[in-house]
Image (cartoon, rainbow, N blue to C red):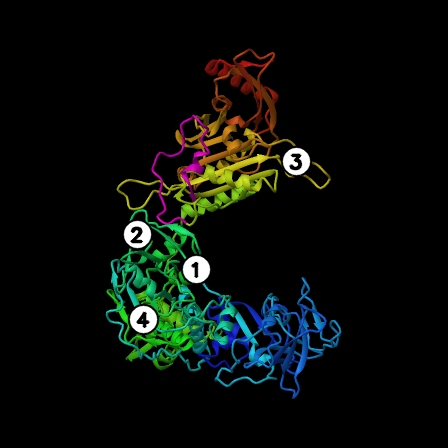
């Protein structure tokens, strides 16, 4: 949000440099991200540097307020005119200009009212208005079509105010100082248009600061200076509003308060120059006095307003007094909003209606049918309060984001509605004339309760480490707008109604103490050692094993990813090939009541979709991916308030086996099933999990015949292998096979051995021999390895499969499995005879139990 400093000074005196103020605000949690100088010189403070865009400092002697007294035709050019400018120098200065907004005044003689503008004398530095790139220039005398010219009247672009260059700056009335004193010709332009704008980044909990006055409250508290609220007095000279409008609130939980005020016999015209200038500084386009006032009050005090053309409402009511109704929509109701879009209303959209139909979406945007136009003479002004969750939900479902919605969606207290309607109707009277009807229609069925917090002084010392007295703490809180009544060693703190972020009970105490720290200054809090007793520490085995698994996978060369838990059923359906049953969990999805985006409507059932989407996104930048994710899936359970959230481990490998080298090597062949199996085995080894077995998997997301089901001691842990080609095609991953795993992480951790044996380094040399056994195709390699290890006994240290072969001369329906065997014992160096006896025993056991034959 942009905060013009001149506007800010209406409510608080600022006696420190702006950069220092920005630092104080940021340190207190109201982050100033940027400072924009408009015509004014920057102040420099040692040790403080703020992001500031390049700007033009207006020369106080050469850039002045001018008054155009007459506009003459140029004798030699139809597209140029001669502006006769009074700049306080005694004689009028002739400026040759092609500004189109001056042509209507040409050859009308001396103007009855001067046109107030920005005037630059010879030697002034301005921006080149005709250059597409930012470029400065110094004014020098130069003839334009035969007429000497040494000065100019300026556009906003030439002064660096905006990119507007369609005409010169023209004030609608004589500019005035903040105290109302008129500015005279020759007044330095710095004093007229110069300003500094703070750009403030506001988090949702800072709803109180979504206005210039809200920021002023913070400034007053931090600088310990008085706060000047705007006037909420209203001159009500018209007949009473009673009988001319009424209110019916049907959903008080969504619309706790609604107020109306009436202005008769007003005139729609441009708003005053000072108001237009402030609205432009906060990036709002001036429209007319009534609409501008609604925007002005929104930015001034944070209470959005909406103005209706009262006569249009009365016509809709058949000539009777309109009745304003707030309700939920009927099925099929639509509304054309002020942006010209016809909207089908959602069942949760709270509406402002009359008896003829819908007028606006509450708290977000009005309808086009009753908007203010040039013929409006009677204005019915609305200020209301809305449920912030409902407004946020409606903004999302309607894809409609407005300044009003931004404020209501963060929370505006119902008390602000009455202040807003009073401030708005009086400004409309001042800017357009007319009479304000006596009285305000105020429907408030659910008054908000006051929040009071009992705060022990000892709690302040315990949390902050500073021994504040009751008087010191009360003084700091009073600066922040809190009411405080000391009662012995306890402060009874009355929370201001606009502080919706302050809780009750223990949470309220912490919130109040935070306010004391903010206002006092975090930098002033001394460093102290903790005095509370440190709580007992208990091991968290599940977390420790999870971190250990991460370390192991990273050591194996994988990179961790973290993906959204939110998806859609359609996206998850992509991991099942067409025509095949899904292998994902059968539980219902956990559905979001208010999705943040159309592609995030349910909680996921599998990590496979997340990993494949990550791979698809990264495939544009890398031809080699080796990643893993540890995260929850969400399974809805009937008659349970919360879903089950089992933790899964997902692994994905695709592309080259290794990264390319600088000498030009490409990284070798693509990864295959055994690379993934090696990662799984490396994980099991790193976690000290024993008893793993593998068999053919039936998961439909994986390639049949190229996937395996991992079990630990007969407990199924998960599936790994090559992803089905139809699935990879659905994710546009056709360049290389994709290998993935999805494991039940909690089931896996149940088999982690916390007490494992550590073997000493071998003291004798090993004996290495290979063995190749021919077995039927249906025999799992794990079963062959089990037989080898059991038959090898204590002398067989390790058995590792290194080759699988099918084809001549292996008989059809059989395969050859080749193992590397390591024989070793720490007691002695093994002889060839000892190894031969064990080797023969292994062969006989394989023949007896598996029908294996030793390959020749």
Dots 1, 2 in contact, CB < 8 A: no
Instruction: Name the N-terminal-most of marks 4 and 2.
Output: 4
* Residue 379 appears anywhere in the view: yes
**Disc 4/disc 1 C-alpha distance (Å):** 23 Å
In the image, which residues are magenta?
566-595
Alpha carbons under labels 4 and 2: distance apart? 25 Å
Q: Read off the residue under disc 3.
A: 667
Q: Which residue is mark 1?
A: 402
Q: Residues within 10 Å of mark 2 (few under 14, many from 20)?
A: many
Mark 4 vs mark 1, foreground winner is: 4
Q: Quadrant of residue 518?
A: bottom left
Of circles 1 and 2, the one toward us is 2
Tag 3–tag 4 contact (CB < 8 Å)? no
Mark 1 nearby-residue class (10 Å; few <14, some 14–19, many ≥20): few
- Pick whichever of labels 1 and 3 is earlier in the sequence: 1
Badge 4 is on which residue? 261
Of 23 and 534, nearer the camera is 23
């Amino acid at each position: 949000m942009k905060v013009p400093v001149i506007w800010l000074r209406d409510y608080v005196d600022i006696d420190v440099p702006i950069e220092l103020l920005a630092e104080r605000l940021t340190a207190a949690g109201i982050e100033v991200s940027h400072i924009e100088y408009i015509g004014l010189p920057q102040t420099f403070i040692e040790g403080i540097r703020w992001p500031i865009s390049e700007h033009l400092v207006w020369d106080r002697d050469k850039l002045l307020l001018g008054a155009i007294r007459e506009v003459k035709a140029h004798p030699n050019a139809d597209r140029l005119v001669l502006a006769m400018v009074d700049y306080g120098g005694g004689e009028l200065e002739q400026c040759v200009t092609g500004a189109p907004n001056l042509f209507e005044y040409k050859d009308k003689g001396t103007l009855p009212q001067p046109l107030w503008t920005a005037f630059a004398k010879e030697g002034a530095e301005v921006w080149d208005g005709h250059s597409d790139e930012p470029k400065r220039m110094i004014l020098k005398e130069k003839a334009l079509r035969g007429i000497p010219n040494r000065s100019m009247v300026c556009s906003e672009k030439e002064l660096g105010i905006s990119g507007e260059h369609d005409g010169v700056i023209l004030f609608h009335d004589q500019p005035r100082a903040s105290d109302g004193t008129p500015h005279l010709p020759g007044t330095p332009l710095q004093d007229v248009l110069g300003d500094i704008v703070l750009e403030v980044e506001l988090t949702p909990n800072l709803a109180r600061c979504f206005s210039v006055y809200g920021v002023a409250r913070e400034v007053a508290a931090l600088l310990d200076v008085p706060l000047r609220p705007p006037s909420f007095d209203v001159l009500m000279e018209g007949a009473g509003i009673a009988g001319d409008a009424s209110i019916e609130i049907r959903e008080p939980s969504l619309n706790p308060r609604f107020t109306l005020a009436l202005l008769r016999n007003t005139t729609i015209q441009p708003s005053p120059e000072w108001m237009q200038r402030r609205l432009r500084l906060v990036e709002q386009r001036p429209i007319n006095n009534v609409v501008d006032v609604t925007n002005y009050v929104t930015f001034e005090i944070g209470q959005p307003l909406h103005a209706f053309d009262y006569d249009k409402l009365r016509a809709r009511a058949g000539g009777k007094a309109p009745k304003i109704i707030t309700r939920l929509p009927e099925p099929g109701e639509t509304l054309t909003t002020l942006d010209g879009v016809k909207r089908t209303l959602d069942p949760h959209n709270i509406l402002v209606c009359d008896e003829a139909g819908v007028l606006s979406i509450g708290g977000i945007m009005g309808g086009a049918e009753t908007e203010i136009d040039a013929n409006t003479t009677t204005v019915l002004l609305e200020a209301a309060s809305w449920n912030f969750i409902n407004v946020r939900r409606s903004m999302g479902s309607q894809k409609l984001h407005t300044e009003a919605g931004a404020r209501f969606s963060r929370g505006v207290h119902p008390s602000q509605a009455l202040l807003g309607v009073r401030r708005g109707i009086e400004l409309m009277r001042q800017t357009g004339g007319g009479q304000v009807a006596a009285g305000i229609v105020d429907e408030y069925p659910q008054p908000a309760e006051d929040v009071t917090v009992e705060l022990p002084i000892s709690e302040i010392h315990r949390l902050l480490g500073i021994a504040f007295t009751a008087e010191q703490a009360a003084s700091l809180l009073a600066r922040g707008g809190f009411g405080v009544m000391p009662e012995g060693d306890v402060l009874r703190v009355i929370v201001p109604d606009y502080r919706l972020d302050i809780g009750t009970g223990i949470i309220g105490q912490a919130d109040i103490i935070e306010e004391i720290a903010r206002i006092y200054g975090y930098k002033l809090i001394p460093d102290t050692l903790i005095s509370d007793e440190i709580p007992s520490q208990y091991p968290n085995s599940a977390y420790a094993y999870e971190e250990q698994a991460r370390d192991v996978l990273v050591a194996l060369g994988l990179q961790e990813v973290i993906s959204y838990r939110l998806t859609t059923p359609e996206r998850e359906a992509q991991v099942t090939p067409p025509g095949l049953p899904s292998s994902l969990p059968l539980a219902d999805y956990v559905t979001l009541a208010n999705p943040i985006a159309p592609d995030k409507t349910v909680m996921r059932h599998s990590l496979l979709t997340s990993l494949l989407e990550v791979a698809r996104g990264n495939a544009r930048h890398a031809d080699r991916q080796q990643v893993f994710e540890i995260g929850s899936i969400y399974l809805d359970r009937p008659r349970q308030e919360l879903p089950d959230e089992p933790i899964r481990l997902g692994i994905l490998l695709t592309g080259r086996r290794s990264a390319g080298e600088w000498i030009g090597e490409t990284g070798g062949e693509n990864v295959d099933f055994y690379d993934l199996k090696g990662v799984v085995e490396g994980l099991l080894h790193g976690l000290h999990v024993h008893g793993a077995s593998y068999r053919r998997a039936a998961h439909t997301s994986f390639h049949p015949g190229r996937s395996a089901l991992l079990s630990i001691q007969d407990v199924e842990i998960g599936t790994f292998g090559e992803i089905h080609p139809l699935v990879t095609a659905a994710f546009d991953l056709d360049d290389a096979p994709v290998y993935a795993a999805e494991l039940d992480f909690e089931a896996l951790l149940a088999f982690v051995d916390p007490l494992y044996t550590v073997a000493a380094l071998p003291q004798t040399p090993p004996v290495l021999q290979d063995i190749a056994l021919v077995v039927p195709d249906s025999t799992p390699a794990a079963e062959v390895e089990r037989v080898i290890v059991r038959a090898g006994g204590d002398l067989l240290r390790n058995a590792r499969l290194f080759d699988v072969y099918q084809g001549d001369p292996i008989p059809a329906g059989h395969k050859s499995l080749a193992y590397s065997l390591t024989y070793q014992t720490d007691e002695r160096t093994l002889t060839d005879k000892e190894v031969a006896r064990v080797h023969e025993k292994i062969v006989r056991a394989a023949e007896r139990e598996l029908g294996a034959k030793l390959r020749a």
